[in-house]
Image (spheres, rainbow, N blue to C red):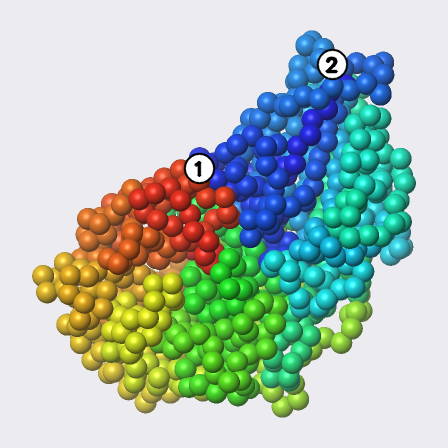
Amino acid sequence: MMLLLTVLLAAAAAGASILSPSVLPLIVRNPYLSTWLANARDPPWEHWPMFWTGQEVVPVAPLLAVARQADYPTSSFTVSLPTYDGASFDASATNLTYRLDASDSSNGPVRVTLSFLSPITPTSTLRQSFPAAYMVIYVEGSVDVNIYTDVNGEWVSGNGDSMIGWQLQDPASELGNRELSIKSWSVARRTELHFTESSDRAEWGQFQFTAPSSAQHQSGTSAAVRLQFAQQGRLTGEVDNRFRPVKDSEPVFAFSTSFKLSEGAGNETDGGSEKGSMVFTLALVQDPVAQFAAARGLTYMRPLWASYFPQPEDMLAYHYADFEAASRLANNYSQQLAADATESGSHNYRDIVSLSARQVLGATQFSGTPDNPIVFLKEISSNGNFQTVDVIFPTFPFFLYTNPRWLAYVLEPLLEHQLSGQYPNDYSMHDIGAHFPNATGHADGNDEYMPVEECGNMLIMGLALVNSMRHEPEHPAWAHSQRHGQFVPWRPGPRAGPAPGPAPGARGSGLPPLEVDEFGLDRPFRVDGATGEESARAWASRSYKLWKQWTGYLVRESLIPRNQLSTDDFAGWLANQTNLALKGIIGIRAMVEISALVDERRDAQQYSDISRQYIEKWLDYGISRDGTHAKLAYTWYGSWTTLYNLFADSLLCFHAPKSSIPRPGGRQKPLGSSAKDPFIPGRVYSMQSNWYRAVLQRYGLPLDSRHLYTKSDWEFFAAAVASRKTRAAMVESIAQWVNETVTGKSSSNTAPTLLALGFRAACNPHLNQIDP
């Protein structure tokens, strides 16, 4: 027999992709279930996969043995490397495909696809809340194939000295489910440390590695278990009960199985070959997932799925049985996203967007209850802040596109915490915790100082969500009809424990509850027949105190910003920032719409007058004397900046004809002022578009005149409101960086524009493109 050792995962549903990034997402589900393929342009077996921090991990190590002939001695093997046919990916999946040459040339090669699926399911928030992913191994050929795969203890600790324990479970039989036959390796720290990290990896939770019951199993020292399969082609069923540290005689937990492809060889309908596959799932079960300084006080927050399944085993069994439905839902989204991105930009833009989708959701953790869902977010790759407003801001176009209610769930903890009076400043807080997963707030008010930045961000995102709720267009990503015939019915059980709701006397989120049908799909986002307008008004009214407070701060401080940080804090403090002032002024303009919605007409008129006055002064202060570009700062003559906050003016439709009537097909007409009187003149858009094309570098548009580095999030914001010619040039320059960068980290949003290198930074990819 011939033996293949590889350490890669993939997803079989992914379509063709053009870009060749240096890193590919494999298992990307939340901040702690996040594994990537490093150095993805190299043969996959040359490198271990990595956690998002860049640390090498041993997540799953498949061994595949190909038989030479039926009567060949099972104890005789030779080692051989496969032919690698390359990778493909979409929004939810990554494919890596190989060919294994059989020793008998008359049989032809065996084709193997190692497949990982981290499904993005906008139509099913319940499924999106599962902390689990699929690994599927597909084989096709005419000779028998034996497959082995294992995991180790690095899934449950970032410290190799941590003591771990394990057991083999049969979740389906424990639940009395005779229709499903699976078994799981359950691995955990012997002493779990709630809300504690080591090298950004969680030190609490149970890792579950699940396979069909027909699979063979074995646990023990990594070298011994792998050698057993290499020599015998099978596992013994032994369970090593000597619990020990992660790196002490490294314990691994393995499954193996056989595909008897030779038995169907000669089938003319399949060209003389047989096909086979096996589904594995990988999950990191944490309960609680975070602690949050809610209105009721410091609360241990349970995962959202715990409101639907009484025990983790119920969720894991459902998730395993749901593979086909989850795959279909994810594929619907991936296809629609690819079509929309291609239409908006190009095939390269499609690939960038597809790579970015899992990256956004890989920073999230779904929590709360159906009455008050919450999505927590970790600031990945920088300092680990919890629910950072200026990290949410560059992701909000993704949420608006994918599922606007998820944006509401992301904003909810920030609103609840500040409405409860736990933050002392009169501007918006920067984050709700210095380090995820501890949202303990900043009662002393000493969070990172970005007052104009965060007030503007919250008001802009608030109005964007209100507009989505008011008009609720039938977004293409939601438009696919559901074929329920092959879906697994969801069987609700009693809740596993008390589910925190609003504290006595506290107001709810103002949002409709999350309701799911019998197949786990979201029901319409309405309550008791309320219109979209009424739902939006209820949500905005609940936090009107905060909206008005933050707008008041912007009225005092945004036109001429004092020395402070913007979201680009690595660039340092600076006074009179042109782009920052623009964000604040647009925030005031956004409040005009929010005030009008809740029938605060006097406020609306006041903020309309102020925002108009401010934008006229901003045009005088912020534009260069020759009228060719925006300055970095009002008094910094000769400087220039990427004016990416124009995106908010465009997204909120302040520059376009006023209308509240949805277009045919569900597309919303703009809601801003009349075409004769745009908030920001069209000449500013044209001016900046021309300037961007003039200063564009090989690998993108520099952030400003101080340095040659750039940020891909703001590049896409700027490209979205540039001319088509400029937009195309910017997207292609970013694509060139993706294809040529040598960074070994998961996709960063910060990079140089002249060299194909990468920097570690908060990962904030963005999607929407809007024509000015």
Which residue does the image show at 50% across and 34% down from the upper left?
41
- Horizontal and vertical percent position of residue 173: 89, 51
| Circle number at residue 19 | 1
Q: Is residue 378 left or right of residue 483?
A: left
Q: Amino acid at mark 2?
A: Gly
Whether residue 186 is visible here, answered yes or no, is yes
Furthest residue to the top? 106
Q: Camera-side residue: 440 or 48?
A: 48
- Which mark lies nearer to you, 1 or 2? 1
Identify the residue at the far left of this view: 626
Secondary structure beneath label 1? loop
Q: Amino acid at mark 1?
A: Leu
Residue 373 or residue 56, whichever sits in front? 56
**Quadrant (top left, top right, bottom left, bottom right) of the C terminus:** bottom left
The N terminus - image quarter: top right
Residue 619 sits above or below residue 700 on the image: below
Check whether the beta carbons of the residues at disc 1 and disc 2 lie within 8 A of each other. Answer: no
The quadrant holding residue 655 is bottom left
- Residue depicted at x 35% and y 84%: 553
- Observer-nearest residue: 126 or 203? 203
**Whole-percent x, y for residue 589 in the image:** 31, 76
Of pointers 1 and 2, the one earlier in the residue sequence: 1
Q: Is residue 427 above or below residue 82?
A: below
Disc 2 target residue: 266
Q: Is residue 542 left or right of residue 646?
A: right
Where residue 378 sits in the image (x, y, percent)?
A: 55, 64
- Foreground pick, 465 / 584: 584
